[in-house]
Image: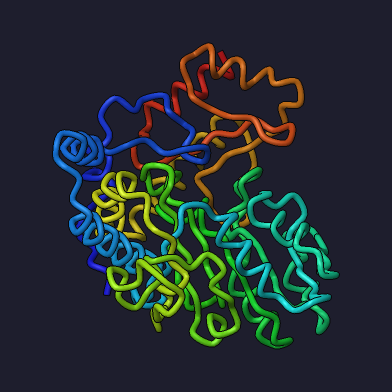
Amino acid sequence: MQTTTLTPEELHAAFPGAQGYLAACSTGLPTVATRAAVVADLDARPDLVHYADVAERCRGHFARLVSTDPEHVAIGSQTSVLVGMIAASLPDGATVLCPEGEFSSLVLPFAHAGRGIRVRAVPLADLADAITPDVDLVAFSIVQSATGEVADAAAIAEAAQRTRARTLCDATQAAGWLPLDAGQFDALVCHTYKWLCAPRGVAFLVLADDFAATLTPLHAGWYAGEDPWAACYGVDASLARSARRFDVSPAWQAMVGAEPALAMFADADPAALHARVTGLASAFRERLGLPEPLRATPIVTWPDPAGTDLARLTSAGVAASGRRGNARIAFHVFNDEADVELAATALLG
């Protein structure tokens, strides 16, 4: 079970020099421990046995983060590849339901799967009601990349269960600040380079056993073997019985950097972390007179079609982003009230 030991203040201390960085929704910052781990690895000789141990610890940390067991977690390097395997395993003519404006890595694998697979998009708020008996799979990000909107995951999962549709949840914009229970979904996919502050190249796929049984391990290599070191050659290697059969060979150096970051977030108090980052976002919205969202989120967006506000933020030394005609900022554990003031002053003068 998850151990809640680290406070938001302790997490904040792991990121010195982060003032003005309001872009966790684009990419996270490395912790002091991640920097040290990567440098130590570069200074040492490569050790594949050590790397395999690191990868397994990362698997375990992520399992704790999403309230599941490690045997349900597969290792990947990109979410689109993991989603592509699911798309390839759908039956011909399947219908996939997704939110309008969903992040492309989650939906393009289905849109280009061929075989008569259809993708239907509806507004996120209507997603649960749009799960009709003809829908085979519902694919959605629990936190929307472009807007920061948080989906009603419970309603979506319950509606899908009533019609026996499968659910695929992307937690890339959620893991690291939003408490998650992967058991709500048939599959949960996540890249860790954003809110979990890991190096790019470390992704995970969590699978329910009955859904995993319907998938084909298209990317199976030696690391998907029951005993990876005995599965390096030939066509007769036995694949793992757990979700490890969907593993790809880990990006070793990325895993080395990811381990301390994943361990830190797995040891955090999820409720306190959620309250801290969403509280900072609320304070910023209050300064700008922006409405509060239906469900709390640390991502703040507002219309900025000409990019004027984004330019003001950038000129003030604030790292921000623009998506779909909106300005977008995000508050994470490395931010504090000074960042709220810095961004608000840049916009209000």
Q: Residue placed at 26% from the left, 47% from the top?
A: 256
Residue 11 picture location, percent across and down:
26, 45
Q: Is residue 171 visible?
A: yes
Q: Is residue 177 visible?
A: no
Nearer to us in this view, 104 or 271? 104
100 lies left or right of 257: right
Q: Quadrant of residue 82?
A: bottom right
Residue 347 picture location, percent across and down:
58, 19
Q: Residue placed at 48% from the left, 21% from the top?
A: 318
Q: In the rendered image of this protein, does residue 233 appear above or below residue 238?
A: above
Q: In the rendered image of this protein, does residue 276 appear above or below residue 3?
A: above
Q: Quadrant of residue 94?
A: bottom right
Nearer to us in this view, 273 or 211? 211
Q: Residue placed at 54% from the left, 34% from the top?
A: 329
Quadrant including the C terminus: top right
20 lies left or right of 9: right
Residue 33 picture location, percent across and down:
20, 41
Q: Residue placed at 66% from the left, 74% from the top?
A: 89
Quadrant including the N terminus: bottom left
Residue ranking furthest to the front = 234
Residue 326 picture location, percent across and down:
69, 33
Q: Quadrant of residue 230?
A: bottom left
